[in-house]
């Protein structure tokens, strides 16, 4: 099974992440970006939906089992390359030239939750899964661009709790605080998402222009920052 696969359902491209917990490593990021490129290049889609094949997990963030040994080996260039690749993926989603919808089919933790914030719209299952930023306990501070990304999607009154305490929210709580558009049982999630996404027939060029203007402050921060090389003390279980 490919790490990423997509289908075209009417005007909606549905991209499914098939990499287990869908953790970020170089191959996952490469395959994700290749799929996004193919959808933009090869399909007439006017909306993108991203979901996970895992029955409990949407995306669990950075693959620390993969990255940890690289950090321990002191390969600063490899770590820096990964950090830039992850930033490039998040930027790609942020400026994707059509409406984007995250169908959060399970846990969205750490970088996975940050990635969800880059989508234009989020829907989440109500019967299982948490949305959480555990970086405060993992010892991996957000990069400046990531802070800007989550501010886009999460109201300020709730962000402090999530950011500083690592609080876990259910799908229902995410809907209550307007982090997601709607939370619903798993069997209703994709029909609800598809009904919403199929109504989004927007001109790609015009939509991209809107995104570029709306997200200009985030992009400026990303362009100015140099993601830090993570040291050994900041990679721990």
Image: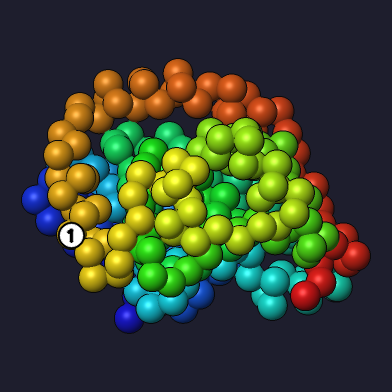
Give coordinates of residue 17: x percent, y percent: 38, 67
The crowd level at tag 1 (other Cα within 10 Å; few <14, some 14-19, many 20+) is: few
Q: Which element is circle 1 on? A: helix
Give coordinates of residue 222: x percent, y percent: 64, 33
Q: Residue furthest right?
A: 233
| Viewer-proximal residue among 143 and 66 | 143
Judge left or right: residue 106 versus residue 80.
Answer: left
Tell me how many marks there are.
1
Q: Quadrant of the N terminus?
A: bottom left
| Viewer-proximal residue among 40 and 24 | 24
Q: Quadrant of the C terminus?
A: bottom right
| Viewer-proximal residue among 47 and 123 | 123
Residue 45's place in the image compared with 223, above or below, is below
Judge left or right: residue 107 versus residue 25.
Answer: left
Residue that appears at 70% across and 42% down: 160
Give coordinates of residue 213: x percent, y percent: 45, 18
Give coordinates of residue 41: x percent, y percent: 25, 44
The structure's colour scheme is rainbow
Residue 210's place in the image compared with 116, above or below, is above
Judge left or right: residue 154 versus residue 189.
Answer: right
Residue that appears at 66% across and 50% down: 162
Can residue 169 be seen at all in this image of the molecule?
yes
Residue 45's place in the image compared with 33, above or below, is above
**Residue at mark 1:** 191
Residue that appears at 43% across and 72% down: 128
Residue that appears at 30% across and 26% down: 207
Q: Hey, which quadrant is residue 103 in on the image?
A: bottom left
């Amino acid at each position: 099974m490919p790490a990423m696969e997509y289908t075209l359902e009417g005007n909606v491209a549905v991209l499914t992440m098939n990499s287990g917990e869908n953790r970020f490593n170089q191959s996952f990021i490469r395959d994700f970006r290749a799929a996004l490129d193919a959808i933009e290049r090869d399909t007439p889609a006017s909306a993108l939906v991203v979901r996970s094949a895992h029955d409990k997990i949407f995306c669990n963030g950075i693959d620390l089992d993969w990255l940890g040994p690289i950090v321990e080996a002191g390969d600063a260039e490899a770590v820096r390359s990964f950090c830039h690749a992850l930033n490039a993926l998040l930027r790609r989603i942020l400026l994707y030239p059509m409406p984007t919808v995250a169908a959060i089919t399970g846990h969205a933790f750490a970088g996975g939750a940050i990635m969800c914030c880059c989508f234009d719209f989020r829907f989440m299952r109500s019967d299982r899964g948490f949305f959480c930023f555990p970086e405060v306990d993992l010892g991996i501070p957000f990069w400046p661009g990531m802070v800007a990304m989550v501010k886009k999607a999460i109201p300020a009154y709730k962000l402090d709790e999530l950011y500083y305490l690592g609080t876990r929210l259910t799908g229902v709580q995410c809907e209550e605080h307007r982090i997601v558009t709607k939370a619903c049982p798993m069997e209703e999630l994709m029909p609800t998402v598809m009904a919403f996404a199929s109504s989004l027939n927007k001109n790609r060029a015009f939509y991209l222009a809107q995104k570029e203007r709306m997200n200009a402050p985030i992009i400026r921060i990303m362009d100015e920052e140099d993601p830090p090389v993570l040291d050994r003390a900041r990679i721990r279980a």
